[in-house]
């Protein structure tokens, strides 16, 4: 079963398969995609911080910070908290299983990346906050 295909239409069987596997690889692609989304979202703020002349450096710094923050939050903090509270109810998951489940649960939100890249390519104004928030909210609900 390819988890990147089945997570979209059959999320429950996908999470059950991850929970039942003992040896599994780390699902890092959703974490990286979420980091790119977060980094591109920080790009206008980084331009304000570094100045108009440093647009490339603002993009690079925003992407590195976004990917680093997503690995910290989706790879360590959220799975760790879920695992700690799961141990209270006698849960038996490994940290890798929790990281995979947290990263795959954010995969639909990475569709915002297509929208953000199109705004970036066409040079449109990325600060239309209501539209951005609406798209993110709909993908978050999915």
Image: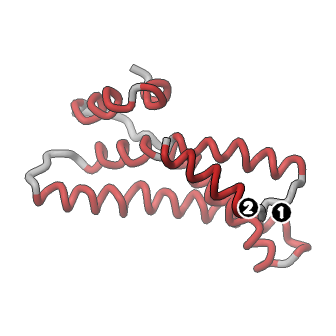
Percent position (x, y) of residue 29? 52, 41
Q: Are marks 1 and 2 in contact (CB under 8 Å)?
A: yes
Tell me the CA gap for discs 1 and 2.
6 Å
Does residue 125 appear to the left or right of 18 in the view shown?
right
Percent position (x, y) of residue 81? 28, 62
Identify the disc placed on residue 56. Answer: 1
Quadrant of the snapshot with the N terminus? top left
| Label 2 neighbour load within 10 Å: few <14, some 14-19, many 20+ | some
Residue depicted at x 58% and y 45% = 110
Identify the disc placed on residue 60. Answer: 2
Is residue 3 at all visible to an observer of this figure?
yes
> Relative to 70, does residue 58 appear above or below in the rendering?
below
Determine whether the residue tagged by mark 2 lies in a helix, strand or loop.
Answer: helix
Quadrant of residue 129 within the rendered picture: bottom right
Residue depicted at x 32% and y 55% = 79
Does residue 127 appear to the left or right of 90 in the view shown?
right
| Label 1 neighbour load within 10 Å: few <14, some 14-19, many 20+ | few
Residue depicted at x 91% and y 73% = 53
Q: In terms of depth relative to the viewer, which is nearer, 93 or 89?
A: 89
Determine whether the residue tagged by mark 1 lies in a helix, strand or loop.
Answer: helix
Most extreme residue toward the left is 90
Display coloring: secondary structure
């Amino acid at each position: 079963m390819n988890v990147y295909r089945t997570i979209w239409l059959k999320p429950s069987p996908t999470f059950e398969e991850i929970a039942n596997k003992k040896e599994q690889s780390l699902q890092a692609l959703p974490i990286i995609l979420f980091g790119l989304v977060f980094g591109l979202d920080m790009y206008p703020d980084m331009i304000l911080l570094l100045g108009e002349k440093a647009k490339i450096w603002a993009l690079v710094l925003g992407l590195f910070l976004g990917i680093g923050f997503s690995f910290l939050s989706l790879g360590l903090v959220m799975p760790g908290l879920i695992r700690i509270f799961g141990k209270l109810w006698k849960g038996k998951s490994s940290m890798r299983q929790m990281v995979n489940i947290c990263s795959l649960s954010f995969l639909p939100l990475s569709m915002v990346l297509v929208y953000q890249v199109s705004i970036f390519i066409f040079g449109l104004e990325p600060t239309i906050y209501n539209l951005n928030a609406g798209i993110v909210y709909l993908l978050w609900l999915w």
